[in-house]
Image: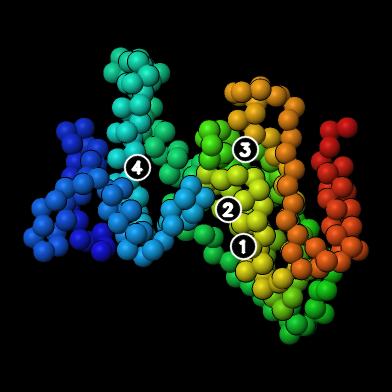
Amino acid sequence: MTDNDFDVIYDESGFAVGAASKLNNVNTVYPVSNAIKQRLKNANHRYYANDNISKFLDDNTRQQLIDEVAKQFDGVLRSLIIDVDNDPNSKGTAKRLAKMYVNEIMRGRYHDEPEVTSFPNDGSHGTDPYKGMLVVRAELKSMCSHHHQPVTGTAYIGVIPNSHVIGLSKYIRIAQHCARRGTLQEELCGDIAKAISAATQSKDVGVYIEATHGCCENRGIGASNSLTQTAVLMGDFLSDASVKNEFYSNIKLQTSRYSCN
């Protein structure tokens, strides 16, 4: 099924509340999210909170989903006994929340991965192949799947280039794309490592993340100084002690550079 197989249905407020199938003269009406989920199921594609589902959406469907989610958020706010009709600070909050989830804090689920061009690392451009280690620092914003609280941190991405290299900014874009969804820090570390390995065609990759979690700071134990550290090492970063030590030494150098002390 494609987007052309459905007519979008709007309510009197302009919210997209459903889709009517145009296939086989079927007149069944159901939410736009149901149509998307059916496409996912037909393709046997998982849709966990940290899964990218962008290939099952286009700009039109994404806007329809925002309208549907806004209507649901409107119901949540009303159930919380918030007067969204008369409170000037709460008017439009439902739509703002929906746009924030789809286009910002969970952008990595609903939007395509960044385009990444790789370049030969074989001396064909008149320069010697780079055979050293590369370590890139990337600031991250993510969201905990358990409580939908913010996760704020820094990823240090290490790679020993193989036959290809990518632009420095692409390491950061890839990491941010992986982070912008509901996930756990342990999973995020592995997702970034696999994505970097695929983009660079290198099996020698290391990813270290340190982050603060809103689920520890804003609720529960209320730990204002909590810090979580995770690392995923692949190839020589895992098996070669000297490579591992160089990676962590580079992280220490970068951490001291950005320290306030």
- Per the model, the C-alpha gap separating discs 4 and 3 is 23 Å
- Per the model, the C-alpha gap separating discs 1 and 2 is 8 Å
Q: Where is residue 256 in the image (x, y as percent from the top left)?
A: 87, 42
The disc labelled 1 sits on which kind of residue? Ala
Element class at badge 4: helix
> Mark 2 or 4 closer to N-term?
4
> Mark 1 or 3 closer to N-term?
3
The disc labelled 4 sits on which kind of residue? Ile
Q: In this view, does 16 lie to the left or right of 208?
A: left
The disc labelled 2 sits on which kind of residue? Cys
Mark 1 crowdedness (10 Å alpha carbons): few <14, some 14-19, many ≥20: some
Mark 2 crowdedness (10 Å alpha carbons): few <14, some 14-19, many ≥20: many
Foreground mark, 2 or 4, reads 2
From the image, tell me which residue sits under label 1. 195
Element class at badge 1: helix
From the image, tell me which residue sits under label 4. 66
> Mark 3 or 2 closer to N-term?
3
User: Which residue is rendered at x = 82% and y = 80% of the image?
Assistant: 128
Asked if one can make out residue 6 in the rendered structure from this viewpoint, the answer is: yes
User: Which residue is rendered at x = 76% and y = 68% of the image?
Assistant: 235
Q: In which quarter of the image is residue 45?
A: bottom left
